[in-house]
Amino acid sequence: MDGIDGRVRNAVDLWLRWLPRWQIGTARPRTRICRKCTGSPIASAAGFGPDVPHPVQHALIGRISTIIDDAVDDYTAKNLPLLHRELARADARKRHAGYQPAEGLSPEFQGLDIDPQPQDGSPFLFTLEELAGTGASEPAPREPLSDQAKAALRHEIELSDECARSTGTAVCLALIDHRERIAEAVERLVEPQIEALVSDMFRGLDGDGPRGGLF
């Protein structure tokens, strides 16, 4: 299995293959701050500036975050039996929770709003968010934990957090090596779309467009 460097390289490769399909005109405005991307060290490691559209950043940050999540899951399964058992129970409760529209999405869409904002006078017949929980069933009752088990579980959570931090640091250091590729793709595929959008906006403000002068 690839190490961190190989996994990061593969994630960047997948993002580079996805990026040509992204169109600025299809991006929906966000109504909430994205907790995955806001202040993310992954964005800094990738070299994303403030002018890079959020969907473009989110697509790569999501893939890189998956590398960290997978590493923590693997470490937990091998070394943290109490936490692994609790996570398995949480997964079982999710299966009883019915339809969850945000589950199973590709990294480009994880954490984003699952429904667009309705337009005035044109309400939706239904939304995916309204369908959440369809088919839910009653889960089995949860066994209470002893004080000793709670203390041991807290210790395992601390070890899991440390694994996430160390893996995150390694991932960000590996991602820095791909800044040039990322910047070139943004300049070639994203910036022309932004410039065209801004140009269209100014043409709309100016009516028939500027006449005479330096333009």
Image (cartoon, grey):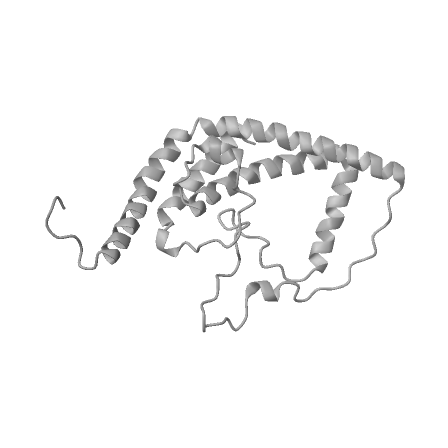
Q: Quadrant of residue 132?
A: bottom right
Nearest the camera: 127 or 205? 205
Residue occupying image coordinates x 88% and y 36%: 148
> Percent position (x, y) of residue 184?
34, 34
Give the x, y percent position of residue 191: 32, 42
Which residue lies at the image location 50% right of the left edge and 27% below the top edge?
Answer: 174
Residue 90 higher or lower than 78, as above or below: below
Q: In the rendered view of the protein, which quadrant contains the N terminus?
A: top right
For the point 89% across and 42% down, the residue is: 146
In this picture, residue 38 sits left or right of residue 85: left
Query: Which sits in the foreground, 27 or 133?
Result: 27
- Residue lying at the far front of the rendered structure: 213
- Mark yes or no: residue 165 visible: yes
Q: Is 193 on the left-hand or right-hand side of 163?
A: left
Give the x, y percent position of residue 107: 52, 46
- In the rendered view, does 183 fall on the left or right side of 140? left
Q: Residue 80: where, in percent of width, then height?
A: 75, 34
